Amino acid sequence: MSEHPPQGLPNIASPLSLHSETVQPDWIDYNGHMNLAYYMLAFDHATDAFFDYVGLGESYLAANNASTFTLEAHITYDRELMSGAPMRFETQLLAHDAKRLHYMHFMYHAEEGYLASTNELVSLHVDMTERRSAPMPEDVLARLDQIAAAHGKLPRPEQAGRVISIVR
């Protein structure tokens, strides 16, 4: 995957499909399914692919001494995944401003098609010299604006903004 998408991001997928991988045998817990810690790892790989796509990946850090930090994350566990299961990820940009991104990943069983899990995140753009928040460059914001225009036509995910509680 290229660190920088083509100019103008023609035909932006809604949602984006940028990552896939397989459940590794050492990710399985004593219940015989993927351990919850590895869901976050797999979602982090999907975040890396998303940030590469928008121009905020590892080469951006090297060139600009700026990066992103996660401020908040929420995972739902909808259906279990077993060892060797192929996973397919979709990413939807929910909102952004000059310093923050709000986005959601959807993890699907790549062959059976069911939704296994979701991950909602808010990330902050950070100047690594100061280790403080800083506005993203205009070219990155322009890419995010284009993605937001495409993703704004998608329905808001029912999992977005959920609060953890026991409903009585």
Image (cartoon, helix red, strand yellow):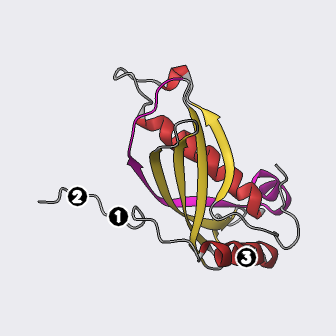
Asked whether the viewer can see residue 134, the reply is no
Location of residue 64 (image quadrant)? bottom right
Three-letter code, disc 1? Arg
Depth order, front residue of 58/113: 113
User: Please, what secondary structure does the residue beneath circle 3 have?
Assistant: helix
Asked whether the viewer can see residue 27, the reply is yes
User: Please, what secondary structure does the residue beneath circle 2 have?
Assistant: loop
The reply to whether the C-beta atoms of the residues labelled 3 and 1 are less than 8 Å apart is: no
Highlighted range, magenta: 57-83
Circle 3 is placed at which residue position? 146
Location of residue 66 (image quadrant)? bottom right
In the rendered image, residue 141, in percent from the top left (x then y), is placed at 73, 76
Three-letter code, disc 2? Ser
Which label belongs to residue 162? 1
Residue ranking furthest to the left = 168
Depth order, front residue of 117/45: 117
